[in-house]
Amino acid sequence: MKKVNIYWSRRDFRLHDNPALYECVQNCRETHSEFLPIFILENYMLKAEPKFQFGYPSRYFLAKALPEFGKHFENFLLLKGRGAETILEMQTELISKYKNGLELQLYVNEDVYIDFYKQIKKLKKHNIVVKVFNDQLTVDKETKSNNGLGNYYSVFTPFKKAVWKEFLNSKVLPKPDLKSLKYVKINHINKVENTFETIWHEFSKNRKLEILVENKKEVVDIEQLLDFKPDFQNLENFIYEEFEAQKHFKKYLEHELRNYKENRDSLEKDQTSKMSLPLAWGLVSARYLKKEIVEHFDDDFSEINWFKIDDKLAGSIQYISELIWREFYKYLFHHKPELMNEEFQEKFRYKVKWVDSKIAKERFQAWIKGETGYKIVDAAMMQLAKTGWMHNRARMIVASVLTKNLGVDWRWGQEYFRAMLLDLDEASNNGGWQWGASVGADPKPIRIFNPYLQAENYDKKNIYQKKWLGDDRFFFGPEPLVDHKVARNDALKRYGLSQEKDGEVRDY
């Protein structure tokens, strides 16, 4: 009986703290099993479809990152097809190869999306032993509040305090020893050669900026709107390899993290860690970043006085809190996959009166092109269009303006970000858009961002706006599509609020 352990890499392109890879390798040594690491180039990854929104930035990143990850292995198998079906086809070929019988085990890190569990269920039905490991969601996904009702958390701060110690105590696994492993020797499976030239060939056929945003029966072809493509070749913070991500974060720890809380929202300083891309694609884990912070400051951060935080540790505590925000959104998404298209707050489902589709499409296109007339918004939209990345403060501003000032359904913005972001994390993107539209979890008064006040607070010297707009557009750009004061009143009506209900509205 031949024993084979398959490690299925999905969004976990790293060796350090990779639970599925670590356990797979350990078991190979203990049971003398053959080792087979794989990645499946799924059909949706090869072209832009609104259903999946695997856009040009994602294809570009994968084409750069996957070959680098594959270099760590003596034999890394690149497959093409649909996830579970491709693995079942491979199982058939392995059975034909090993005439004396096959004991197959699949190791994979858990995802939080419903499709992942469907695929795992299908594999188990065909007698494949599947071992799934916690990864993207570190804390217990069944965490419930202690309010006596046993409900899942819907507000971030209580959730953060409930899981704080669990997150800080989470285990960080070492890099596995890949030496002297016995690899499965298969050169051709599923008509895809075991070479990374394949992926370049596949992606080279789809270098166009094929981005379609489809919502409410409206289709917007972004390639027809933008007269340029994102340029990632010389992008300063474009990281696609684990070691570079670790190196970048260590440097950030040394020079910037201490001031993270006070500087993280500044658009002109832009002193964020740039770890959203490595986290989204699994070049590093949240646990690894947490461990580096704890070791650097020689503090386990387990006992926090939330009413009086030490100034020296404020930046670190804020950063850890942001990592837990990512956990919170994945936690919500796991329990409510319908959030992709449905408001978390039931009172706003189908009740917010978005502008009609014709006006929405016109405003949405202007927003994409950076022609809303709000300079801070237009600058941010140019940053995204040209680089596939946007500062987090800018993401909040553009989301508020699209939904509140322009009255466009938040799902349109979510789809554009899905198609354009290099650092796309579906749960965080969805959570951010629902937050920006004031329809999501962590309910607060309706937040209306004043784009002029936001620019004044976070780009005082207009450095960010001039960088992405240029002097001509900064000084001679278009007038606002909607005057902000008028837009604010329209937004209140849209949400069924009145000017008198001050407790339900908060301006930023």
Image: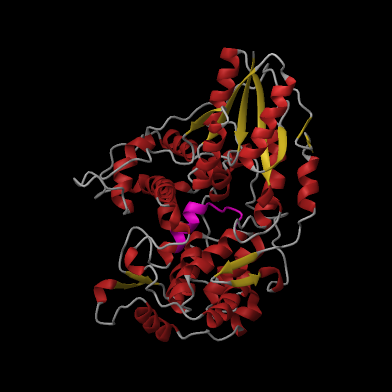
Q: Position of residue 68 (x, y in %)?
A: 70, 38
Which residue is painted at 71% across and 52% down in the image?
Answer: 46
- Residue 377 visible: yes
Q: Position of residue 2 (x, y in %)?
A: 66, 15
Q: Quadrant of the N terminus?
A: top right
In the image, the segment drawn in magenta is: 421-433
In the rendered image, residue 311 lying in the magenta stretch gets the answer no
Q: Quadrant of residue 98?
A: top right
Question: Foreground residue, 305 or 27?
Answer: 27
Q: Position of residue 359 (x, y in %)?
A: 54, 82
Which residue is painted at 59% across and 15% down in the image?
Answer: 29
Depicted 23 relative to depicted 279: above or below: above
- Residue 310 visible: no
Which residue is painted at 65% across and 74% down in the image?
Answer: 470
Lateral position of residue 128 relative to residue 435, left or right: right
Q: Quadrant of the C terminus?
A: bottom left
In the rendered image, residue 431 lying in the magenta stretch gets the answer yes
